[in-house]
Amino acid sequence: MRYFWSTVAVAAAVLAGQLLSRLTPLPNLSMVFLMAVLLAAVRFGMWPAVYASVLSFLVYNFLFIEPRYTFGVTEPHELLALLIFLVVAVTTSALAGRIRDQVRVAAERMRSTRRLYEFTRKLSGLADADAIADGAAGEIHTSLARPTVVLLNQGGKLALAGAWPPDDELDASSTSAAEWAFACNEPAGAGTSVLGNAPWLFVPLRTRRESLGVVGVAHNRDRAPLDSEARVLLDTMAEQVAAALERASLGREMVSARAAAETERVRNTLLASISHDFRTPLASILGSATSLIEYGDRLQAPTQRDLLGQIKHEAEGLDEMVRNLLAIARIDAGALELRYDWVDLRDVVERVASAARRRGAAQRVEVMMPAAQPMIRADATLVEQALNNVVNNAILHTPAETRVAIDAVVAAATVSLRVTDDGPGIPAEFLPRVFDRFARPFGSKPARADGGEGSGLGLAIAKGIVEAHRGTVAAESPVGAGRGTRVILTFPHEEERS
């Protein structure tokens, strides 16, 4: 087809020459044919232009050089002009064709560079190995217009991680070529010296540390093999895929390292807090018990009762801390077992308030439950522990003259227990983290260890217990007049069955 249109260009030059000859006598019409040669060179390349040059030489000689309609030349200068025209035409066609080929190659390289840039940009937004493999298969298929597969190393064996079209399957020879390319870290399959009869070409995905897998493109017999530009593009894309996979692997390792570091930090914080919170009551118990043992017969009865009361009080505090630690351990392990029963929240609230007063809370603990209070299906012991932690937290972080009120709000499908104090409140920057473990407002210095709150576990445990009941927790501060804190424990409820 290119030679046909080159012939058409020469024919158009002949018509133009005939027309110009009739309009005005011209000493030399070779420039008209040279235009046809240049058009063929620019449009169709070097060899169609050379063909047009020779054809123009013959037609120009036959139709426009005396004697006309023969290939003979009578005048020496006409022969010289004809030969110079042929040389100029062939040289011009060669130069123009070469420039055209260079422009085409430059345009293809620019498109390849653009595709590679888009390919790298898309891979940079993926963090999962399977997503990278799937995205890479699609992009390589689009760039090379060939079916593409990506196989990744899983436990020392290659597994199909991405393919486009998705239904591509590998035969035995292709599988062998892929395994060889992965094991030897060299290309294998179609177009190579290793298993060259395989219908797929496989390029290894290698990094400085290891080989991560292979990427393969199909070589159909009805298609031409990959040219040098396409092969370079494939190798470059394979390098980018390997880099993206390595980045994803390093990202996973970084996340694991951060998780391990955070676990170690939490463990150290927990050990330090527990050692401090246990040491204080144990020292009090040890001192009181030693006094009773060594000086019991010389101590008056009120003093002995006071020492025994201190032992009992501190032992209760230790028991509460141990229960909280066991609770947080069960929450972490997902082993928090709920013993559901119908629970009267009024009884739970009264027990928690009585326990707070019995422990000598300086704050005024008030109960304001509504008259109509529905029963809820819950674990009574855990609900009491959650509410007790919230009340103890309010007592621990508020001055002695503070009022701590416990009430409930009943909705259509929920019951919310609210613990409200009129203390200084929670700083705004700390409020979103109030239910985190080991969370304490900046500068907070608890004067006592009460139910794990010295370790910052009380509210975290309450949150875990409520969420195990399919409920929610929330904190508000300030409550009114720029002061106060309210912690809300919301439980679902249903109609009691008779």
Image: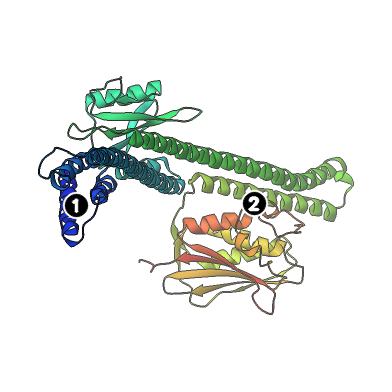
For disc 1, the neighbor class at 10 Å (few under 14, some 14 to 19, many from 20) is many
Q: Indicate the secondary structure of the residue bearing disc 1.
A: helix
Which quarter of the rendering shows the C terminus?
A: bottom left
Q: Is residue 198 left or right of residue 133?
A: left
Of all residues shown, which one is farthest toward the front? 75
Would residue 255 be seen by someone viewing this image from the given angle?
yes
Q: How many neighbours does mark 2 have within 10 angstroms: few (below 14), some (14-19), or many (20 or more)?
A: some
Give percent across and percent down for residue 182: 37, 25
How far from the left and from the top, in percent, is residue 450? 69, 55
Q: Amino acid at mark 1?
A: Ala
**Mark earlier in primary sequence (2, 1):** 1
Nearest to viewer (mark 2 / mark 1): 1
Taking the spot 90% from the left edge, 46% from the top edge, the residue there is 298
Farthest-out residue, bottom:
481
Q: Find disc 2 in the rendering and name its residue.
A: 320
Label ID, residue 322: none
| Horizontal relation, residue 434 to residue 215: left or right | right
Answer yes or no: do the residues labelled 2 and 1 have beta carbons within 8 Å?
no
Q: Name the residue type under label 2.
A: Glu
Query: From mark 2 to mark 1, how far is it between C-alphas?
Result: 106 Å
The reply to whether residue 147 is in sight is: no
Secondary structure at numbered mark 2: helix
Say how the picture is coloured. Answer: rainbow
Q: Is residue 315 positioned above or below 91 on the image?
A: below
Residue pointed to by mark 1: 13
Viewer-side residue, 46 vs 54? 54
User: Residue 387 falls in which quadrant of the image?
Assistant: bottom right
Horizontal arrangement in the rendering, residue 490 relative to residue 223 (left or right) = right
